[in-house]
Amino acid sequence: MTMPQRMDKSLLIASLTLFVIGLLMVATTSIAISEQHYGQPFYYLFHQLMYGIIGLTCAIAVLNVSSVKWQQVAFWLLLLSVVLLIAVLIPGIGHQVNGSRRWLGLGLIGGQVSEAVKLFFIVYLADYLVRRREEVMTQTQGFIKPMILLGVIAALLLKEPDFGATVVLTLTVLGMMFLAGVKLRHFLILMLIIAALFALLAISSPYRLQRLTTFLNPWANQFDSGYQLTQSLIAFGRGGWFGVGLGESIQKLFYLPEAHTDFVFAVLAEEFGMVGLTVIMALYTTIVVRVFRVARCAERLQQPFSSYVCYGIGLWFALQTLINIGVNIGVLPTKGLTLPLLSYGGSSMIMNCIALALVLRIDYECNKH
């Protein structure tokens, strides 16, 4: 396998920089919990490094696969998504953690299936939008069909339950449909229906309703339902402009739950301050902007499948990043979503690497013309 030479250097550098910072943050945020659970301080770091190596290896492989091959297997990726989401719900195959059955517990082929489903559905939808372009733009059934498929995927995700992944995937799909030229009235009606369904789902579960309402005033229940958010806000307050220094966070010492996963951004704020957060936000902005630039380039070169894939990946990264940060700063309800390339998580790291490599491959193909 070889590395294509002509590809977006800014996107590659920003991604690799976040990858390295992510390893650093996993190391500093997980020392205490790793020592407590496994008797050595770098258990999570070693695992994240292993996932990173696997992710980079997969990325190099993806760089050598034409986007045409992805389009040819788009339907099979959708089918695989459904199979994985069903399998994870089967006791003995699916692995339950903290009340959610989101992980395949099959050793080397285990992992959080929702991370793969996001990319697979984006690839399938991109192929669908190319094959049914006129139908999508002119007929109601053109956008109802993928919405039915999305409904099936969303129902399986909610069965785990994984409300966060459902929200990210749904918003990504809506964004792709809008960019494909769905009639505005159809799009608005669809938005209203989905918003109503999400509202119904939220109020139908006491657990979800509590999460949705707690973030409005976490200090009212700071030792109960608002505990995570109040500890996160304390971390931001301690960080100030320049932070307390690498490794000096107090909140990661068993005060802030999930410090190495969902709330790594809060620890980063405590240790590096507003200046550090600005750098991180600049890196994420660079990634999203460059991915959209590749999408626009593919669109100009009459490569609609590649364009839609890049738009989908750009929306996915932007939405997941914004939602995770929104949760950390208390403007959104708590959801179990990782921060791309920064949070601890094998499935997330591997699929992030694959997705960005696919964008780089598409950029390489655009530059050949």
Image (cartoon, helix red, strand yellow):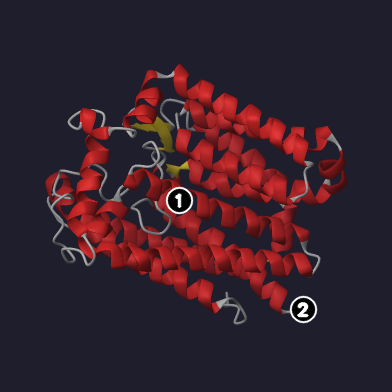
* Residue depicted at 70% across the width and 30% down the height: 148
Q: Residue at x 73, y 55 (%)?
A: 71
Amino acid at the residue labelled 1: Leu
Measure the C-alpha gap from mark 2 to mark 1.
Answer: 34 Å
Depth order, front residue of 97/109: 97
Query: In the rendered view, would you say 68 is above or below 78?
Result: below
Question: Which mark is on residue 130?
Answer: none
Residue 262 seen: no
Q: Secondary structure at mark 1?
A: helix
Question: Where does residue 352 sit, x and y in percent of width and height?
Answer: 49, 57
The C terminus, quarter of image: bottom right
Q: Residue under circle 1? A: 322
Quadrant assignment for the N terminus? bottom right
Snapshot quadrant of residue 241: bottom left
Dot 2 falls on a residue whose secondary structure is: loop
**Circle nearer the N terminus (2, 1):** 1
Q: Which residue is mark 2?
A: 369
Q: Position of residue 23 (x, y in %)?
A: 31, 63
* Camera sees residue 159: yes
Q: Residues within 10 Å of mark 1 (few under 14, many from 20)?
A: some
Residue in the foreground of this view, choosing between 351 and 178: 178
Q: Amino acid at mark 2?
A: His
Q: Residue 21: x, y in percent?
A: 33, 66
